[in-house]
Image (cartoon, rainbow, N blue to C red):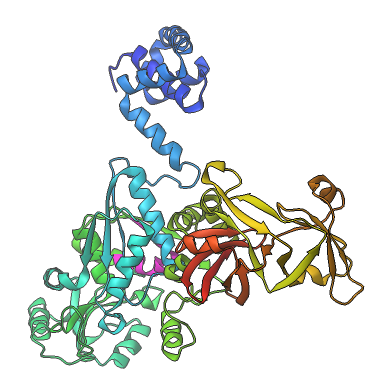
Amino acid sequence: MAGADPRDLLLRCALSNAVKHGGVPQAGAVIGMVMGANPELRSRAKEVSALAKDVISEVAALSPEDRRRKLSEIAPEMLAALSEKHEHKKVLPELEDAGKGVVMRFAPNPSGPLHIGHARAAALNDAYVKMYGGRYILRIEDTDPKRVDPEAYDTVAGDIRWLGLGITETVYQSDRLTLYYDLCRQLIEKGGAYVCTCDNERFKELKMARQACPCRDQPVEQNLALWEKMLAHGFREGEVTVRIKTDLLHPDPAMRDFPAFRVLDSPPHPRKPGAFVYPLMNFSVVADDHLLGVTHVIRGKDHIANTRRQRYIYDHFGWKVPVYRHYGRMGIEGVVLSTSQMRLGIKEGTYSGWDDIRLGTLRALARRGILPEAVKNAMLAIGIGETDISFSWDNLYAENKKIVDPVANRYFFVPDPMTATIHGAHPVVSRLLLHPADEKRGVRTLAFSGNVLLPAAELADRTRTLIRLKDLFNVAIEHDHGRPHIAFAGDSLADARAAKAPIIQWLPAGAEVPCTLRTPEGDLAGVCEAGVQQELSKVVQFERVGFAKIDAVTDDGIIAYFTHK
Ligand code: GLU
């Protein structure tokens, strides 16, 4: 900005400050900011401070809308930066070197459906791409056929659609094998890699003793010949490894000449049945991060050792290293996350499928009525901090509740129903709002004509003498004749409140529909309003019980999944 007009600089700064904070800034603050960014103005301090007063009063005279409009005329980039920062400021720290936009990626292995652990990388990278602008690459990391589940290609794609990520392009690593082979050849030519034919155990002994294996010093020509032999399937599985030259004296043995390519004779790759030379993840990740122009990588701390290994490859090629952030570990309790355990459980019939609600998959969350926005918001709230944390289901539920509470229709669900005759009450039709905050949504009608269904548990407490049936009337209960005797006790809500009477849900006997509420702890058998039949696939609120997703509506009744309180 050398040579820029100081008045213009002051005006931009004052306007941006006023828009950001919703008030006119102090002259001193504006002067400080402008001088800090433009040290050449220090010699003109007097002039700048006189101009500042002038500019401040100009800004003060404008309405908030006019300040915004003026800023958008003279410095649209400042206005844009303000609104972007404002949106994400609370949750995500800035990334370095991101000002010109970013290229980021989400890189799952197609070994099973995505679970809540994956959602963190998926959501954070997504949010940063939205924050800075740029591209978001979905990279399917399928170069280990032993860990590929052919069905998972579709499953993962479906999970990503559900999450609603802003993916701009998708690449499959199995489509890119020849790119990796070319780079391997280049790396061998540079002396950065060698083809090792040592017995694996022998190599390990040497590595632990910080010694080179005989292959390490082979001339480049010999390495190239061995590489060609490898590509021509002249080696069987286990006979050969391409290794990256690192530092044999590195204190961590896992850094010493780690493997980059291997031969696998089986199983056949589901997408490339003829393939047998495969890169290991450190090589393919670096190759693609470089080739795809990835600028920023956000991944878990469990990748820190990989980041160290990957640097050796960047250094050999002389490539620019992306900006890395490694977030802390996230313990997730209460659900099964291990793909092999899930798969086994499904096979044995312990779990009904990948969306069984005892599993931590995104499918299971969806089935229970957790919305993708809630998952993403919960992950952004956790952020990219390095501290290890345990995942809070309560926070996820709170995020979900913010979204479903304003939209979920209300109904009565009566668990373990007991029929009761209400003595002394006239028939009456109760009209209840579908949503307490939105009368326009309409009402549900429950016609009382003598007998009601009540939750048995509510009548089990023999000290209870007064209960209010929600939006109906109060009833008095006498317990001394075995079966409780229940009688009309007035309409007044105030009386019920004064007596601290519980307000409970009820249904007219005869109008109920059977409903099973599935919870992770087991099924709750009950009955609900017939209107729930119109809510298939939606989340409703069963008053006093909690939110639930209506999973199935059949002639035998309704199946609902408990979402949260
Ligand atoms: N495919 C790797 C994983 O799922 C991610 C690799 C990376 O983020 O660099 O763990």
Whether 301 is among the magenta residues is: yes
Rendering coords of residue 391 (x, y %): 55, 64
Q: Please identify the quarter of the rendering in which residue 249 is found.
A: bottom left
Task: Find the residue positioned furthest to the right.
Answer: 480
Residue 15 located left or right of residue 174: right
Ligand 1 falls in which quarter?
A: bottom left
Horizontal and vertical percent for residue 451?
73, 66
In front here: 442 or 219? 442
Our reading of the magenta stretch's main secondary structure is: helix
- In which quarter of the view is residue 457 placed? bottom right
In the depicted view, which residue is nearer to us: 83 or 318? 83
**In the image, what residue occupies the spot 29% across and 23% down?**
1
Magenta segment range?
297-310
Q: Residue at x 46, y 19 (%)?
A: 64
Residue 405 horizontal/vertical position (percent): 56, 51
Q: Is residue 192 visible?
A: yes
